[in-house]
Image (cartoon, rainbow, N blue to C red):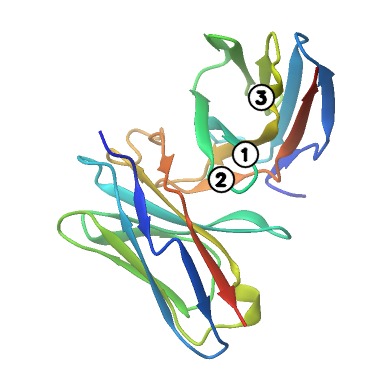
Amino acid sequence: QKEVEQNSGPLSVPEGAIASLNCTYSDRGSQSFFWYRQYSGKSPELIMFIYSNGDKEDGRFTAQLNKASQYVSLLIRDSQPSDSATYLCAVAGGYNKLIFGAGTRLAVHP
Amino acid sequence: KAGVTQTPRYLIKTRGQQVTLSCSPISGHRSVSWYQQTPGQGLQFLFEYFSETQRNKGNFPGRFSGRQFSNSRSEMNVSTLELGDSALYLCASSLQGSTGGQSDTQYFGPGTRLTVL
Protein backbone atom coordinates (compact mmCIF):
# COMPACT_ATOMS: atom_id res chain seq x y z
CA GLN A 1 0.00 0.00 0.00
CA LYS A 2 1.38 3.41 -0.97
CA GLU A 3 1.77 5.92 1.83
CA VAL A 4 -0.16 8.66 0.03
CA GLU A 5 -2.72 7.76 -2.61
CA GLN A 6 -4.41 9.93 -5.18
CA ASN A 7 -6.50 9.15 -8.23
CA SER A 8 -4.26 9.96 -11.20
CA GLY A 9 -7.16 11.25 -13.28
CA PRO A 10 -7.54 13.07 -15.51
CA LEU A 11 -10.40 14.73 -13.71
CA SER A 12 -12.31 16.72 -16.28
CA VAL A 13 -14.68 19.48 -15.15
CA PRO A 14 -16.43 22.28 -17.02
CA GLU A 15 -15.45 25.87 -16.41
CA GLY A 16 -17.29 27.30 -13.41
CA ALA A 17 -17.85 23.91 -11.75
CA ILE A 18 -16.44 22.61 -8.48
CA ALA A 19 -13.43 20.31 -8.79
CA SER A 20 -12.99 17.82 -5.97
CA LEU A 21 -9.57 16.24 -5.47
CA ASN A 22 -9.04 13.48 -2.95
CA CYS A 23 -6.13 11.96 -1.11
CA THR A 24 -5.75 9.19 1.47
CA TYR A 25 -2.73 8.48 3.64
CA SER A 26 -1.56 5.50 5.63
CA ASP A 27 0.31 6.95 8.63
CA ARG A 28 -2.23 7.64 11.34
CA GLY A 29 0.27 9.81 13.20
CA SER A 30 0.63 12.34 10.38
CA GLN A 31 -0.08 15.90 11.47
CA SER A 32 0.68 18.19 8.52
CA PHE A 33 -0.91 18.08 5.09
CA PHE A 34 -0.21 20.13 1.99
CA TRP A 35 -1.62 20.67 -1.46
CA TYR A 36 0.66 21.73 -4.29
CA ARG A 37 -0.18 22.59 -7.87
CA GLN A 38 2.27 21.74 -10.64
CA TYR A 39 1.95 23.01 -14.17
CA SER A 40 3.64 20.97 -16.89
CA GLY A 41 7.37 21.67 -16.94
CA LYS A 42 7.25 23.75 -13.76
CA SER A 43 7.99 23.13 -10.10
CA PRO A 44 5.31 22.53 -7.44
CA GLU A 45 3.59 25.63 -6.09
CA LEU A 46 2.03 25.60 -2.61
CA ILE A 47 -1.73 26.10 -2.59
CA MET A 48 -2.71 25.29 0.99
CA PHE A 49 -1.71 23.53 4.13
CA ILE A 50 -3.95 22.11 6.82
CA TYR A 51 -3.14 20.75 10.26
CA SER A 52 -6.51 20.40 12.02
CA ASN A 53 -9.62 18.38 11.30
CA GLY A 54 -12.28 20.25 9.39
CA ASP A 55 -12.30 22.76 6.58
CA LYS A 56 -9.89 25.53 5.73
CA GLU A 57 -10.82 28.05 3.07
CA ASP A 58 -8.60 30.36 1.03
CA GLY A 59 -10.30 32.15 -1.82
CA ARG A 60 -11.65 29.60 -4.27
CA PHE A 61 -9.83 26.75 -2.52
CA THR A 62 -11.05 24.69 0.44
CA ALA A 63 -8.97 21.98 2.07
CA GLN A 64 -10.74 19.35 4.15
CA LEU A 65 -9.08 17.04 6.63
CA ASN A 66 -10.52 13.99 8.36
CA LYS A 67 -7.82 12.32 10.47
CA ALA A 68 -10.11 9.52 11.64
CA SER A 69 -10.67 8.46 8.03
CA GLN A 70 -7.10 9.44 7.02
CA TYR A 71 -8.49 11.55 4.23
CA VAL A 72 -7.60 14.96 2.80
CA SER A 73 -9.40 16.72 0.01
CA LEU A 74 -9.15 19.92 -2.00
CA LEU A 75 -12.16 21.66 -3.47
CA ILE A 76 -11.73 24.26 -6.19
CA ARG A 77 -14.81 26.42 -6.68
CA ASP A 78 -15.57 28.25 -9.93
CA SER A 79 -12.89 26.24 -11.76
CA GLN A 80 -11.05 28.10 -14.50
CA PRO A 81 -9.05 26.76 -17.46
CA SER A 82 -5.97 28.21 -15.73
CA ASP A 83 -6.56 25.70 -12.91
CA SER A 84 -5.68 22.88 -15.31
CA ALA A 85 -2.60 21.29 -13.76
CA THR A 86 -1.49 18.34 -11.66
CA TYR A 87 -2.44 18.62 -8.00
CA LEU A 88 -0.11 16.95 -5.53
CA CYS A 89 -1.14 15.91 -2.05
CA ALA A 90 1.74 15.77 0.45
CA VAL A 91 1.90 14.45 3.98
CA ALA A 92 4.69 15.36 6.38
CA GLY A 93 6.82 12.41 7.44
CA GLY A 94 9.09 14.07 9.99
CA TYR A 95 11.74 16.80 9.77
CA ASN A 96 10.48 18.42 6.60
CA LYS A 97 10.18 15.14 4.74
CA LEU A 98 7.14 15.44 2.51
CA ILE A 99 5.63 12.23 1.17
CA PHE A 100 3.83 12.96 -2.07
CA GLY A 101 1.03 11.22 -3.83
CA ALA A 102 1.34 10.58 -7.55
CA GLY A 103 -0.84 13.60 -8.28
CA THR A 104 -4.22 14.11 -9.93
CA ARG A 105 -4.37 15.75 -13.35
CA LEU A 106 -7.17 18.29 -13.52
CA ALA A 107 -8.51 19.49 -16.86
CA VAL A 108 -10.95 22.40 -16.85
CA HIS A 109 -12.66 22.79 -20.20
CA PRO A 110 -14.45 25.95 -21.40
CA LYS B 1 11.57 38.57 -1.34
CA ALA B 2 13.41 36.43 -3.87
CA GLY B 3 12.33 32.83 -4.12
CA VAL B 4 14.37 29.66 -4.01
CA THR B 5 17.02 29.60 -6.71
CA GLN B 6 18.70 26.54 -8.19
CA THR B 7 21.67 26.29 -10.47
CA PRO B 8 22.22 25.08 -13.05
CA ARG B 9 18.74 24.77 -14.53
CA TYR B 10 19.75 22.13 -17.06
CA LEU B 11 22.58 19.65 -17.08
CA ILE B 12 23.65 16.84 -19.38
CA LYS B 13 26.11 14.27 -18.10
CA THR B 14 27.27 10.81 -19.10
CA ARG B 15 27.16 7.62 -17.10
CA GLY B 16 29.87 7.35 -14.48
CA GLN B 17 30.36 11.09 -14.09
CA GLN B 18 29.47 13.03 -10.99
CA VAL B 19 27.39 16.17 -10.64
CA THR B 20 26.88 18.92 -8.08
CA LEU B 21 23.66 20.91 -7.88
CA SER B 22 23.23 24.11 -5.92
CA CYS B 23 20.31 25.62 -4.05
CA SER B 24 19.91 29.03 -2.41
CA PRO B 25 16.92 29.19 -0.06
CA ILE B 26 14.58 32.10 0.52
CA SER B 27 16.28 34.72 2.67
CA GLY B 28 15.84 33.82 6.32
CA HIS B 29 14.94 30.20 5.66
CA ARG B 30 17.22 27.75 7.43
CA SER B 31 15.87 24.39 6.28
CA VAL B 32 16.58 22.99 2.83
CA SER B 33 15.10 19.76 1.49
CA TRP B 34 15.91 17.98 -1.74
CA TYR B 35 13.57 15.92 -3.89
CA GLN B 36 13.85 13.87 -7.06
CA GLN B 37 10.96 13.86 -9.52
CA THR B 38 10.64 11.25 -12.26
CA PRO B 39 7.63 10.21 -14.36
CA GLY B 40 7.74 6.71 -12.93
CA GLN B 41 8.37 7.35 -9.23
CA GLY B 42 6.92 10.82 -8.81
CA LEU B 43 8.33 13.17 -6.19
CA GLN B 44 10.62 11.45 -3.73
CA PHE B 45 12.42 12.91 -0.72
CA LEU B 46 16.20 12.77 -0.78
CA PHE B 47 17.34 14.57 2.40
CA GLU B 48 16.86 17.63 4.57
CA TYR B 49 19.38 19.99 6.13
CA PHE B 50 19.00 22.47 8.95
CA SER B 51 21.83 24.51 10.42
CA GLU B 52 24.37 22.53 8.40
CA THR B 53 23.12 19.20 9.81
CA GLN B 54 21.35 16.47 7.90
CA ARG B 55 18.24 15.68 9.94
CA ASN B 56 16.39 13.35 7.63
CA LYS B 57 17.25 11.10 4.73
CA GLY B 58 15.18 9.25 2.15
CA ASN B 59 15.75 5.83 0.65
CA PHE B 60 18.41 6.64 -1.89
CA PRO B 61 21.82 5.01 -2.32
CA GLY B 62 24.95 6.55 -0.86
CA ARG B 63 25.85 7.98 -4.27
CA PHE B 64 23.46 10.78 -3.36
CA SER B 65 24.88 13.16 -0.81
CA GLY B 66 24.44 16.73 0.26
CA ARG B 67 25.63 19.48 2.52
CA GLN B 68 24.57 22.83 3.81
CA PHE B 69 26.69 25.87 4.39
CA SER B 70 26.55 28.41 7.20
CA ASN B 71 24.55 30.81 4.98
CA SER B 72 21.93 28.03 4.51
CA ARG B 73 22.83 27.47 0.88
CA SER B 74 22.89 23.79 0.03
CA GLU B 75 24.47 21.51 -2.52
CA MET B 76 23.70 17.97 -3.49
CA ASN B 77 26.10 15.65 -5.21
CA VAL B 78 25.47 12.52 -7.22
CA SER B 79 28.49 10.35 -7.94
CA THR B 80 28.86 7.60 -10.52
CA LEU B 81 25.80 8.70 -12.45
CA GLU B 82 23.41 6.09 -13.82
CA LEU B 83 20.83 6.44 -16.58
CA GLY B 84 18.09 6.16 -13.95
CA ASP B 85 19.35 9.31 -12.25
CA SER B 86 17.86 11.38 -15.07
CA ALA B 87 15.25 13.46 -13.30
CA LEU B 88 14.14 16.87 -12.15
CA TYR B 89 15.90 17.67 -8.89
CA LEU B 90 13.98 20.05 -6.72
CA CYS B 91 15.10 22.00 -3.72
CA ALA B 92 12.63 23.38 -1.20
CA SER B 93 13.21 25.77 1.65
CA SER B 94 11.31 26.49 4.82
CA LEU B 95 11.75 28.77 7.78
CA GLN B 96 12.93 26.27 10.32
CA GLY B 97 11.44 22.88 9.59
CA SER B 98 9.46 20.85 12.06
CA THR B 99 8.31 22.24 15.38
CA GLY B 100 6.12 20.38 17.83
CA GLY B 101 5.29 17.71 15.29
CA GLN B 102 4.07 20.14 12.64
CA SER B 103 6.08 20.51 9.46
CA ASP B 104 6.78 23.96 8.15
CA THR B 105 5.54 24.93 4.70
CA GLN B 106 8.10 24.29 1.99
CA TYR B 107 8.61 26.45 -1.07
CA PHE B 108 10.13 24.89 -4.13
CA GLY B 109 12.73 26.23 -6.49
CA PRO B 110 12.49 25.88 -10.27
CA GLY B 111 14.51 22.67 -10.26
CA THR B 112 17.53 21.33 -12.11
CA ARG B 113 16.77 19.05 -15.04
CA LEU B 114 19.50 16.39 -15.15
CA THR B 115 19.87 14.17 -18.18
CA VAL B 116 22.28 11.24 -18.00
CA LEU B 117 23.36 9.79 -21.34
Distance between the Cα atoms at labels 1 and 2? Answer: 5 Å
Q: Secondary structure at mark 1?
A: loop
Separation (CA) of disc 3 from disc 2: 14 Å
Residue type at mark 3: give it. Asp
| B24 lies left or right of B7 | left
Question: Which residue matches tag 2?
Answer: A42
> Where residue A2 appears, x then y in whole percent?
73, 49
Disc 3 and disc 2 in contact, CB within 8 angstroms: no
Q: Which residue is mark 1?
A: A39
Residue A76 image offset from top left, x and y in percent: 67, 15
Quadrant of the rendered image containing residue A17: top right
**Amino acid at the residue labelled 1:** Tyr
Where is residue A110, by image quadrant? top right
Q: Residue at x 68, y 46 (%)?
A: A3
Relative height, residue A106 to residue A53 (above, below) = below
User: Do labels 1 and 2 touch, CB within 8 Å?
Assistant: yes
In the displayed structure, would residue A11 be above or below residue A44?
above
- Left or right relative to B86: residue A80: right
Residue at figure coordinates x 41%, y 39% from the top left: B106
Question: Is residue A31 at all visible to an observer of this figure?
Answer: no
Can you see residue A9?
yes
Q: Which residue lies under the disc numbered 3?
A: A83
Of all chains, the one bearing label 1 is A
**Pick the front one: B8 or B78:** B8
